[in-house]
Amino acid sequence: MPANAAYANSRTPAGHVPDPLVDAHDGESRGLPDMPPDPVMEAFGLNVYYGDFHAVHDVNLSFGRHEITALIGPSGCGKSTVLRCLNRMNDLVTGARVEGEVTYHGQNMYARNVDPIAVRTHIGMVFQKPNPFPKSIYDNIAYGPKVTGMKVENMDDLVEGALRGAALWDEVKDKLKQSAYGLSGGQQQRLCIARTIATKPDVILMDEPCSALDPIATARVEDLMHELRSDYTIIIVTHNMQQAARVSDRTAFFTARADETTGNRTGLLVEFDRTSQMFSAPRDKRTEDYISGRFG
Amino acid sequence: MSIATTTAREVTQSLATGRSKEHGPAALIFLGLLWFSMFFGVVVLLVLIIDTIIEGSSRFDGALLTEYGSRVSPETTGFRAGILGSAWLMVFTALFAVPLGIAAALYLEEFANRDRWWNRLIELNLQNLAAVPSIVYGLLAVAVMALLGFDNSGTVLGGAIALALLILPVIIITTREAVRAVPREIRDGSLALGATVWQTTWRQTLPSAIPGIATGTILGLSRAIGEAAPLVVVGLAGSVRFDPEGLLSSITALPMQIFSLTSQSQEDFQTAASAAIVVLLVMILGLNGLAIFIRNKFQRTW
């Protein structure tokens, strides 16, 4: 796996350079080990093709329990594609083909006998654009448990718990029966997070969850992510490097490499490291260029 | 005088010419042609409607709606059988066509793999089906009735089969458009929660598409209600003197009754036919109005 040599190597942290981005982050103080000690999910030799188009090349990653992992990189580098492989949402794209393994608690999720529907009940997903259902706030939360056939003692409690978990309860407790479309964009996105945690997943995937939100709503969602970390493993794709630096424990940097003959751009993983490490002393020149704003 | 002032004056001269290039002679002639073409269509339609209303105005009475057709007293002949027959036809046409049309559209939009040649072939044929002359559907319905073993196809069943076949492509096409208008994000949101494609279609996509489907269905029905050609082929009578009682009772329909009356020579029948045309127009306008109402009331902006 030459493309991921950086990932495979063990290393000693370079001298710490003070950086305002990193100082906002607590990864250092949490004393994170170099590699996730207890990975919930891992990708081995992950290749993704759309028809003949090679979208992602040979990605190896591991996602630690109760950690937030950020996937960053320029547009078209395949970070969203990788994310969508993690709960098999790519299955829904016609012509998509996945090679390699994605394991969840050691089980290969692309094994022949694995049901993608079951995978998605364990690994929830929050999308770029808030996408509440055209139903009431209450029904938005209750939908997941209902369709997955979850045994629910008391749906009201579950709805309240999910909304509290997403720090939305106080804002909506008096209008649970009203349409979710009456909420602001930031509230809608937190509703989508509440909807996801209502099905009690283990891992939450977030695909640029704040890119459609204003700075205040973004800050609230980021705070929420920090709160959720104690119960969930979070993997977030973001365009915003400051966001990656603020919220994540580890960061994976992707870039795209153009094929010499066809010009198709294939995404590959450049560097995977603790966020504090990557933003203070990136090990790869390409990472450094991207983080310092010289390209991408 | 400074350079700036000179330039400003030149600009003023070139902008404030007092004329507009939009209103040159060629442009005005072209505009006039467009107006004429538009008026031609609208005026012909208006003249036709007004003429029909004037001609039938002496028969706008209760008997028109409540009496059966009568040869003996043309001045009180009525369209009770036709109106009831059309109403029955519409109900059963909708019952046959709507479930089939929605199911076909959902399959094509949500389940069919577009890479398969047969699915593309079906799509192409659907577009063509919408352009097939309505009389062909009449022939098809006769064949279906014969296959089902019915001697008399001039019944509610025969007529409804013909009309359902006629509007099926319309319903499929409008339903597909309504389903396609439901954003991908809604489906993704549902699937990401662990719902199956089936659950997602049934609980999210279809309910969101219902206003569009209802609009398309009603527009299809308003086309069907004015059709006479397929009903002629199916063998509906020009006039009956009883109310429809079931799927297999012989009936007539409003367009059929109008068609048979216009071939009569007596003046009173012509008048009655004109009045019945107005009744038919009102029914069609009512259906279209309902469609517009549903569209405006329930239309969702995503």
Image: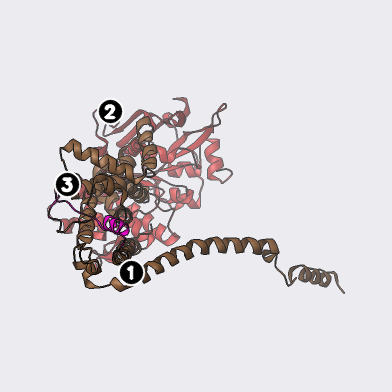
Palette colour of chain B: brown
Pinpoint the chain carrying mark 3: A
From the image, state whether disc 1 or disc 2 is nearer to you.
1
Q: Nearer the viewer, residue B23 or A152?
A: B23
Write the start and end of the magenta stretch as one range. Answer: B245-265
Cα–Cα span, label 1 and label 3: 66 Å
Pinpoint the chain carrying mark 1: B
Palette colour of chain A: red
Residue under numbered circle 1 = B56
Mark 1, residues whose alpha carbon is within 10 Å: few (<14), some, or many (≥20)?
many
Residue under numbered circle 3 = A150
Residue B157, x across and y down, in percent: 19, 47
Residue B302, x across and y down, in percent: 38, 57
Residue under numbered circle 2 = A111
Label of residue B290 in the image: none
**Label 1–label 3 contact, CB within 8 A:** no
Mark 3 is on which residue type? Met
